Image (tube, rainbow, N blue to C red):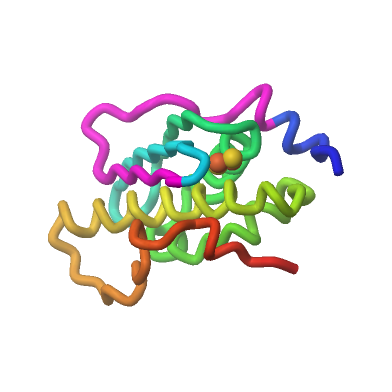
Amino acid sequence: MGYSEKVMDHFINPRNVGEIENADGIGEVGNARCGDIMKVYLKVDDGVLTDVKFKTFGCASAIATSSMATELIKGKPVAQVLELTNRAVVEALDGLPPVKLHCSVLAEEAVKAAVKDYYDRSGIAYDPALFAGLGEEDPHGAIEEE
Ligand code: FES
């Protein structure tokens, strides 16, 4: 199975690449099996995600999913950002080959890790269950299949 046009577009021309100086939250996650690493930077004003950037050292799907994930969450209230799922990212990209679904899990986890970092840094209380399993789990084991 090939890649959708949207995946190719976000891989070749990724949105929101880079870093944010003085970011309010930074999340970094890696996949132990493929070795890919994703880092997400958040800027938050009045509880709203005003800017988001990412750096991904990884495969084409990892880059395309980080690009799409940042597009989906930009401008949203932080609480809503946490509702992002890898499935929503994959749907927005018109699908990914099944063997590449774990790459979208990495994008979801990087975003969540960045939000957690934001909460921790700003002393905002949260339910730890929101981030259960973050960073402990092999994303390959957490793939949501059809
Ligand atoms: Fe590892 Fe895509 S192969 S994130």
Q: Residue at x 82, y 35 (%)?
A: 5
Q: Nearer the viewer, residue 51 or 86?
A: 86
Horizontally, is 135 left or right of 99 in the view? left
Q: Provide residue 69's location: percent of width, then percent of height.
A: 55, 46
Give the residues in magenta.
10-32
Horizontally, is 74 left or right of 136 in the view? right
Q: Magenta: predominant secondary structure element?
A: loop
Quarter of the image where one finds residue 144: bottom right
State whether residue 74 is above or below residue 10.
below
Quarter of the image where one finds residue 127: bottom left
Q: Nearer the viewer, residue 83 or 45?
A: 83
Q: Provide residue 33's location: percent of width, then percent of height.
A: 49, 45
Q: Quadrant of ligand 1?
A: top right
Q: Provide residue 32's location: percent of width, then percent of height.
A: 43, 46
Which quadrant holds the C terminus?
A: bottom right
Q: Residue at x 19, y 64 (%)?
A: 124
Which quadrant holds the N terminus?
A: top right
Q: Provide residue 34's location: percent of width, then percent of height.
A: 52, 40
Task: Judge whether residue 104 is colored magenta.
Answer: no
State whether residue 138 is above or below residue 10.
below
Q: Residue at x 64, y 32 (%)?
A: 60
Q: Residue extending furthest front?
A: 33
